[in-house]
Image: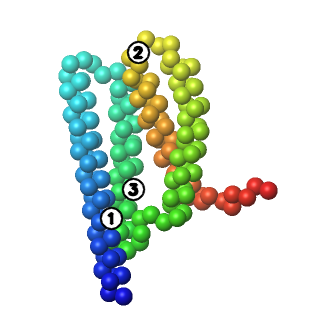
C-alpha cells in the first residue's frame, strides 16, 4: 500500500512539473512573439491583418493559461488531469475541428485567395482559426457532454 501511495505522489510530481514546464514554455513563446511583432512594427506599419493575428494569438494564450492553471489546481487536489471522458472529448473536438476546417479553408480560398498579400497570411489565419475552432468545440463538448452516441 505504501508503494502505491509513493507511486501516486511521484506521478503527481511528474504531471505538475510537466504542466509547469508547458506553461513556462508557452509564456516564453508569447514573449518571443510579442518582441518579434514589436521589432517588425518598428520597420513598417502594422496592418489590420497583423493586429487580428496578434489578437487571435492572445486569445489562444489566455485560454491555454486558464487550462494550465486549472490543471495545476487539479493535480494539487489529487484529481487526475487526464481521464477517459476528457480524452474522448478532446478526440471528438479534434475530429470535428478537422472536418470543419475543410469548410474554413474553402472560405479562406474564396474570400482571401485572390487578394494581393503574402501567402503566409492566409495560412496563418487558417491555422489560428482551426485552433480556435478546436478550443470552441472542446469547450462546448466539455459543457454539454458527448451524448449517448447511439443514433438508432
Residue designated by label 1: 15
Alpha-carbon distance for marks 3 and 2? Answer: 35 Å
Q: CA distance from mark 1 to mark 3?
A: 14 Å
Q: In terms of sequence position, does the residue under pointer 3 or pointer 2 come before the other?
A: 3
Residue 27 visible here: yes
Name, please, the residue furthest toward the right.
Answer: 152
Left or right: residue 60 versus residue 152 is left
Residues at marks 1 and 2, CA–CA distance in whole angstroms = 43 Å
The residue lying at 39 percent from left, 43 percent from top is: 60
Element at label 3: helix
Foreground disc of the pair 1, 2 = 1
Please tell me in which quadrant of the rendered image residue 8 appears.
bottom left
Note whether 84 is above or below 100 in the view shown: below
Q: Earlier in the sequence, mark 1 or mark 2?
A: 1
Q: Where is residue 16, by image quadrant?
A: bottom left
Residue carrying label 3: 67
Mark 1: few/some/many CA within 10 Å (<14, 14-19, 20+): some
- Mark 3 packing: few (<14 Cα in 10 Å), some, or many (20+)? few
- Residue 91, position as x, y percentages in the image: 54, 52
Circle 1 or circle 3, nearest the eye: 1
**Quadrant housing the C terminus:** bottom right
User: Residue 117, labelled with which disc?
Assistant: 2
Amino acid at each position: 500500500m505504501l508503494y502505491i501511495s509513493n507511486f501516486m505522489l511521484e506521478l503527481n510530481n511528474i504531471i505538475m512539473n510537466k504542466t509547469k514546464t508547458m506553461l513556462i514554455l508557452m509564456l516564453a513563446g508569447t514573449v518571443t512573439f510579442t518582441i518579434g511583432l514589436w521589432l517588425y512594427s518598428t520597420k513598417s506599419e502594422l496592418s489590420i491583418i497583423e493586429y487580428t493575428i496578434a489578437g487571435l494569438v492572445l486569445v489562444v494564450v489566455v485560454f491555454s493559461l486558464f487550462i494550465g492553471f486549472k490543471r495545476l489546481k487539479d493535480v494539487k487536489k489529487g484529481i487526475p488531469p487526464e481521464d477517459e471522458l476528457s480524452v474522448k472529448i478532446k478526440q471528438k473536438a479534434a475530429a470535428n475541428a478537422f472536418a470543419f476546417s475543410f469548410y474554413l479553408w474553402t472560405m479562406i480560398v474564396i474570400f482571401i485567395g485572390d487578394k494581393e498579400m503574402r501567402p503566409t497570411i492566409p495560412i496563418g489565419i487558417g491555422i489560428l482559426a482551426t485552433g480556435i475552432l478546436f478550443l470552441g468545440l472542446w469547450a462546448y463538448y466539455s459543457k454539454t457532454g458527448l451524448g449517448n452516441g447511439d443514433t438508432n
